[in-house]
Image (cartoon, coloured by chain):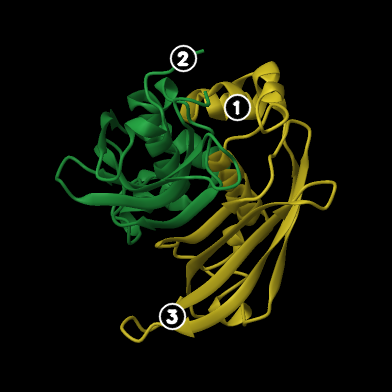
Chain colours: A green, B yellow
Amino acid sequence: MTYRYYYEDCPPGAEMELAPHTVTAEEIIDFASQFDPVPFHLDEEAGKASFLGGLAASGWHVCSLAMRMICDSYLLESASLGSPGIKECKWLAPVLAGDTLRGKVIVEGARTSASRPGLGLLELRCELYNQNDRQVLMFRNTGMMATRGAA
Amino acid sequence: MTYRYYYEDCPPGAEMELAPHTVTAEEIIDFASQFDPVPFHLDEEAGKASFLGGLAASGWHVCSLAMRMICDSYLLESASLGSPGIKECKWLAPVLAGDTLRGKVIVEGARTSASRPGLGLLELRCELYNQNDRQVLMFRNTGMMATRGAA
């Protein structure tokens, strides 16, 4: 199997643009019903009455949407080996029904593993913005990706 | 509206046990199809062939399952006002189809907001374990919760 992107294709400073996604009320309610069933994620009126100002997506839903945007934009064409976790994640503004999200992943650092030859470790920062250019999400994580030679 | 739990009910050192949840292959595939459609989250054979060792839940799915366990265990009965983000999150071991997750949330710190009277800020650590007592998830976050007087 060969991929389009390997560790070597993601040098520090590289930016991957993410395909936009418009969030519907149905998606917000469906996710919240399964995973985060609090009133302001389930009901428009409860959302309006809350500090979020409207029917707002669960923070975990926003992260999951970012993951999907990342998959669709480059990850499924890459030699990705997953991630051990998240270093920091900030939900900076509510994501409301009807919002269109766009964003990017920025490579902040890159090194190969000393203990596992062929394993690249990418320090990544993901940023999502809404249609008003307000940033709604930031997270940083380490992405593991095979080197071109190893894969 | 009154709640069972307010900021004052969550002093440092308090631990909230989470109701167990058994993860099915269908749930793993359903989540991954929507948000993280990589082979080792979608297909048993691909999972077995990967470093994860079987059909494994997306890390974001594991976080979302933790959120649901938290909701069912205490959050829906609390004066919670959400969270601004996650400080650290580690996916420590794969969550495989059939695994039964259990866990707890530990209050590591608590203070009231200087700028918003009636707002409590809880420093929380969530830990999930599988049926073999292996830890699969850790995350730390700040939880916002109204004080008893303010709510």
Q: Does residue B81 sit above or below A45 in this rendering? A: below
For mark 2, what is the residue?
A: A2
Quarter residue B15 falls in: bottom right
Q: Secondary structure at mark 1?
A: helix
Q: Nearer the viewer, mark 1 or mark 3?
A: 1
Taking depth in this image into account, of B99 and B11 the one nearest to the observer is: B99
The residue furthest bottom is: B114
Q: Give the letter of the chain under mark 3.
A: B
The number of numbered discs placed on residues in the rendered structure image is: 3
Q: Is residue A99 visible?
A: no
- Density class for disc 3 (Cα within 10 Å; few <14, some 14-19, many ≥20) is few
| Image position, residue B38 (x, y; %) | 52, 24
> In which image quadrant can residue B76 be found?
bottom right
- Chain ID, mark 1: B
Q: Mark 1 or mark 2, which is nearer to you?
A: 2
Three-letter code, disc 1? His
Whole-percent x, y for residue B120 in the image: 46, 78
- Where is residue B48 drawn, in percent x and y? 72, 23
Which residue is nearer to you in this view: A62 or A125? A125
Residue underneath mark 1: B41
Residue A118 versus residue B73 in the image, above or below: above
Q: Residue at x 62, y 82 (%)?
A: B11
Residue occupied by mark 3:
B150
Q: Of the residues shown, which amino acid type is indicated by label 3?
A: Ala
Closer to us: mark 3 or mark 2? 2
Q: Is residue B3 above or below residue A28?
A: below
Q: In what element is the residue under mark 2?
A: loop
